[in-house]
Image: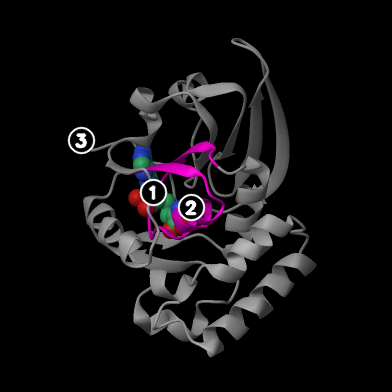
Amino acid sequence: MLQNDTTKHQGMRRKLVSELNKKGITDEKVLNVINKVPRHLFLDSSFESHAYQNKAFPIGAEQTISHPYTVAFQSALLKVSPGHKVLEIGTGSGYQTAVLCELKAQVYSIERQHELFKTTKKLLPKLNYNPKQLIFGDGYKGLAAQAPFDSIIVTAGAPYVPKDLMAQLKIGGRLVIPVGADPQIMYLYVRKDAKTFTKEEFGEFRFVPLLESKN
Ligand code: SAH
């Protein structure tokens, strides 16, 4: 167990899990994982006492860590099984990345902000989370070299669904993506065959924007 994860933090996590459950998150695997991942260690220490509230917080570079409810909701839609190859767009604090690692996925995650990329790349192994690859780059392009993926999760608000992400899904693969300007609508696309996707809608969420890349 991590030294700076105390019984107090664990108690706050249990409360958060019960709050998420009351709000409609019923996926046991996801709730167990939220109960395990020390969210306070992904935030600046000044937010430590608030880390288990269902709130977003600044993580630097004008970005925010997603609400725990949003992380749980998106994670449940992915239907991760152990060994699944999962691509995350928007590594940010690394909290969602850690949740995917705890779900035993092989995780690839892309971040376009260099500062965040550097900080999170150092942090994750310190907390014993070992994603397959953290990439500094443009999430719009996905990661063709490692495609196809069992699922892709976009953790920033996309103006449209990037074609490359659709193309990098396995048959049966799932893409979870918030689309639109503030607020976004959460969509789940499932690839039925080479050309056909089903699309389901899951209501309003608020994300920072998925930006065109600088590199
Ligand atoms: N999953 C993160 C959410 C962070 S907010 C977490 O749990 O903390 C969204 C992140 O997406 C930000 O870090 C932002 O820099 C990143 N982002 C925005 N546009 C991007 C793009 N085109 N490619 C990759 N990352 C992007």
**Whether label 3 touches label 2, CB < 8 Å:** no
Residue 131's disc is 1
Stretch in magenta: 83-110
Secondary structure under badge 1? Answer: loop
Vertical arrangement, residue 73 with respect to residue 197, above or below? below
The quadrant of the rendering that contains the C terminus is top left
Residue highlighted by disc 2: 101
The quadrant of the rendering that contains the N terminus is bottom left
Q: Is residue 93 left or right of residue 199?
A: left
Q: CA distance from mark 3 to mark 2?
A: 27 Å
Q: CA distance from mark 1 to mark 3?
A: 23 Å
Identify the residue at image location x=40%, y=58%: 129
Quarter of the rendering containing residue 55: bottom right
User: Does the rendering let one see residue 55?
Assistant: no
Task: Bin the neighbour count of mark 1 within 10 Å (Cα to Cα): few under 14, some 14-19, many 20 and up.
Answer: many
Q: Is residue 56 left or right of residue 136?
A: right
Q: Amino acid at mark 2?
A: Cys
Q: Amino acid at mark 1?
A: Pro
N-terminal-most mark, 1 or 3: 1
N-terminal-most mark, 1 or 2: 2
Residue highlighted by disc 3: 215
Vertical arrangement, residue 198 with respect to residue 151, above or below? above
Q: Position of residue 171 (x, y in %)?
A: 61, 19
User: Does the numbered disc 1 mark a residue whose Cβ is under 8 Å from ligand 1?
Assistant: no
Magenta span has 99? yes
Magenta span has 144? no
Identify the residue at image location x=73%, y=55%: 27
